[in-house]
Amino acid sequence: MLKQLMIGLVALTMAMPVLADEPAANAIDQDQRMEWWRDARFGLFIHWGLYSIPAGEWQGNTNHAEWIRHTAHIPLETYNQYTDEFNPTEFDADEWVKMAKQAGMKYLVITSKHHDGFCLWPSDQTEFDVSSTPFDRDIMGELKEACDKHGLKFCMYHSIMDWHHPDYLPRREWEKDRPADDADYDRYVTYMKAQLKELIERYDPAVLWFDGEWEGTWTHERGIDLDEYCRSLKPDIIVNNRVDKGRRGMAGLNAEGTDWRGDFGTPEQEIPATGVPGVDWESCMTMNGHWGYNKLDKNFKSTTDLVRKLIDIASKGGNYLLNVGPMANGEFPEESIERLAEMGAWMDNNGDSIYGTTASPCPMPEWGRVTRKGDRVFLHVFDWPADGKLVVPFAAEVTSCKLLAAPQRTFETNATPKGLELMLTGDAENSIASVVELTIDGEVKPIK
Ligand code: H79
């Protein structure tokens, strides 16, 4: 009797509406499932597929990449023939994941399927997949296993747009010889959902990173349905905002006014000017000028630029998803390998100022960036002052001030009307960014 009463009480409590002044239950769920993602701050994006074979070149034009089927107007039957050639004999999942880990990255997002529709896992739903190539291996399975082994979160990019599936609409405007009369978009969505079920059940991705949502056939209603479908298969999955239609262009953050689905905004090739309180976001960026491998694109950003982008993003409360476009043989380009290693060297000594931090507690200073974690504030000094004086635009009671990477080097601080003045002695510790760690007692009061 008592037990029945208890069960009745529990059921009643669960059925009660959430009180107005408490955060909505789904916000709490979201905080829980976003916890690892917010701590991670730095991930590896991988764009790999059939397009890695032409490596950006088609009939003398060399500026293509993962969009090559569209940008070079390659007929479907011609593009399909790359399946006979895809044979990345040098692919080693363990090597890839070790490079990401050594760079300081905490997660990896790989293209399970890009816009061309080719699937990097053996799918039961299509022949246009890795099992139709000479390289009949489960690339996704191998990467998932390597990520588990090395402690990285395994995540997948999945394109809603699909230039291969007969039911996907619309056709490319130049595809005059692919009639769409019998195409049925609902049937395409059924196909995509069956594929996502395979991906979630077989590889348990921590994030699903949708893309190609901008065509008119994809709607807000379909976005809601897909978000709920993914979550029904894996309740704590993280999904980006491109599952829905809220994204405002390449700036990547959602338009206001609608309750758009998705856990985080996705600025592409850009970094927001400031943080956005209460909004999770991740800037995805290339190392050179292309996502997929382009053999002639040697326009790589410097390691200094890449590390400073990571710092800039962290100081605004975002994540950095940095891309590598592996070659058709399964190796990373040499320039990418070098930069990952060099970023790792900086992260080895300074990662504590990135992981688990929140946005700067003060306006952006001219000399660098600021991050925060609990009672510690990290000053990322890009331009080490010649006269040793560094003004930090906040007031705070400082209990210690030292270099993160060389804690024996401590500095004096003075409170001034412009903010906290540091007396830096000696040379910059690191030409990319020297990190000064302040420990604070009490409040940090920004000075604007
Ligand atoms: O997967 C990567 C890109 O392929 C994809 N999103 C990232 C993560 C992406 N989708 N759209 N865009 C990027 C921007 C679209 C640019 C386009 Fe173009 C301009 C498409 C056609 C003209 C850039 C230039 C791509 C091909 C030529």
Image (cartoon, rainbow, N blue to C red):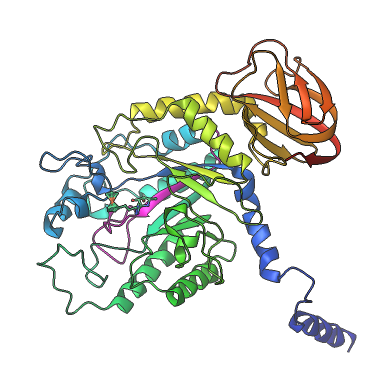
User: In the rendered view, would you say 124 is above or below 105?
Assistant: below
Magenta span has 338?
A: no
The quarter holding residue 278 reads: bottom right
The quarter holding residue 335 reads: top left
Can residue 201 be seen from the camera position used here?
A: no
Can you give x and y, in whole percent of width and height, for residue 421 in the image? 77, 24
Q: In this view, does 379 lie to the left or right of 252?
A: right
- Rendered residue at 79%/76% (across/down): 19
- Rendered residue at 44%/67% (across/down): 245
Foreground pick, 425 / 20: 425
Can you give x and y, in whole percent of width and height, for residue 217 in the image? 33, 73
Q: Which residue lies furthest to the bottom in this view?
A: 1
Magenta span has 126?
A: yes
The quarter holding residue 346 reads: top right
Q: In this view, does 127 lie to the left or right of 274?
A: left
Q: Which residue lies furthest to the top in this view?
A: 426
Instruction: Report the quarter where the N terminus lies.
Output: bottom right
Foreground pick, 153 / 157: 157
- Rendered residue at 24%/32% (across/down): 296
- Rendered residue at 66%/25% (across/down): 435
Can residue 110 be seen from the camera position used here?
A: yes
Q: In this view, does 239 lie to the left or right of 425?
A: left
User: In the rendered view, would you say 159 is above or below 398?
Assistant: below
Highlighted range, magenta:
104-129
Can you give x and y, in whole percent of width and height, for residue 155 in the image? 48, 51
The chief SS type of the magenta part is loop
Foreground pick, 198 / 317: 317
